[in-house]
Image (cartoon, rainbow, N blue to C red):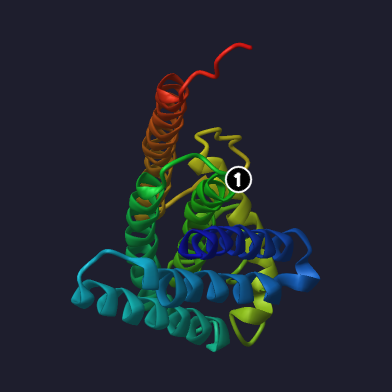
Amino acid sequence: MARRQKGSHLRLLLLFTLLVLVGFAFPRLIWASYVGYSLIALLLTQVMVRDSQAPDWSDRIYRGLGLFAVLTMWLWLLTPLELIYSGVPLALSWSVLVGWSVIRLVKRFADEPKVTESLLMGATAGYLHIGLTAGLVMSAMETIQPGSFEPLTVAQTGDNSVLAAAHAFSAINYYAPVCLTTVGFGDINPMLPLSRMVSVLTSIAGPLYLAAVMGVLIGRFASSLDRDARTAEEAPKRPYH
C-alpha cells in the first residue's frame, strides 16, 4: 500500500510539472503555470515528506520552506513591477527548495527496490522541475535587475503587477531548459554577472542530475536482474515424467 502511494505521488509530480509547461506554452493560461508551481511545492513538502526517513526537525524545516516558497511566489506575482526587490525572497527560497528537493528525490529513488513506471515518471519530473525552477528564479532576476536577459522587455510592459506581465516570462522559461540541457541556441543571452552565474549553475545542475539519477536507475535495474536470476536458480526443478 505504501509503495503504491509513493508511485501515485511521483505520477502527480509529473502531472503538475506538465501543467506548468502547458501554462507557458499558451500565454492565456499563464496563471496555470503558477498554480502548477504551487502544487509541486506543496506535493513535495507537505505530502511526499510523510514517507521520509529524515529526522523530524529536518522535515519540519522542509515543510516550512515549501509554504514560504509558495507565499513568496504569489507575493512577487501580485506586487507592482516597481517593487523590484520583491523577487529576492522568491529567488532565494526556490533555489534552496529545488536543491533540497532534488537531493530528497534522488534518495527516494535509491530506496526503490526496482525500476518501475512511476519511478521513471518521478525521475523525469525531477529533471523538468530543475529547469522550471531555474526559469522562475531567472524571471525574478529580470524584475530585480531589468536587462539581465536580452532581448526581453519585461520592465517596459507598463503593467501594474508582475502577474499582468508574466506572459513575457515565457521566453525566460524557454531559455532555462536550454541552459539545463547545455544546448545554447544563443537567441537569449545573460547580460549581467548574476544572470550569467545562474545560467552557468543551471548548466552544471542538468548533467549532475542526469549522472546521479542514471546511476541509481542502472543500479536498481542491475540488482533486480541479479535478484531474478538468483530466484530462478534457487527454484526447485520440476521432475520429468
Kindly identify the residue that appears in the image at 19 percent across and 77 percent down: 57
Question: Based on the displayed image, in which of its 4 quarters is residue 50 positioned?
Answer: bottom left
Q: Position of residue 22 (x, y in %)?
A: 73, 61
Question: In the depicted view, which residue is nearer to us: 231 or 71?
Answer: 231
Image coords of residue 118 (percent x, y): 57, 51
Residue at coordinates 53% horizontally, 88% vertically from top-left?
A: 79
Nearest the camera: 71 or 215?
215
Q: Is residue 205 left or right of residue 78?
A: left
If the image is split into quadrants, where does the C terminus sit? top right
Residue 211 placed where, x, y %?
39, 33
Relative to the observer, which residue lies in front, 209 or 164? Answer: 209
Q: Which residue is mark 1?
A: 117
Residue 191 x, y percent position in the rendering: 45, 50
Residue sitting at x 47%, y 48%: 190
Q: Is residue 152 left or right of residue 201?
A: right
**Horizontal arrangement in the rendering, residue 99 relative to residue 57 (left or right):** right
Question: Is there any visible trace of residue 24 in the rendered image?
Answer: yes
Q: Secondary structure at mark 1?
A: helix
Query: Would you place residue 27 above or below residue 177 in this image?
Result: below
Residue at the image point whose x is 27% and y is 80% from the top: 60
Kindly identify the amino acid type of the residue bearing the numbered disc 1.
Glu
- Give the crowd class for mark 1: few <14, some 14-19, many >=20 residues within 10 Å: few
Q: Is residue 15 above or below residue 81?
A: above
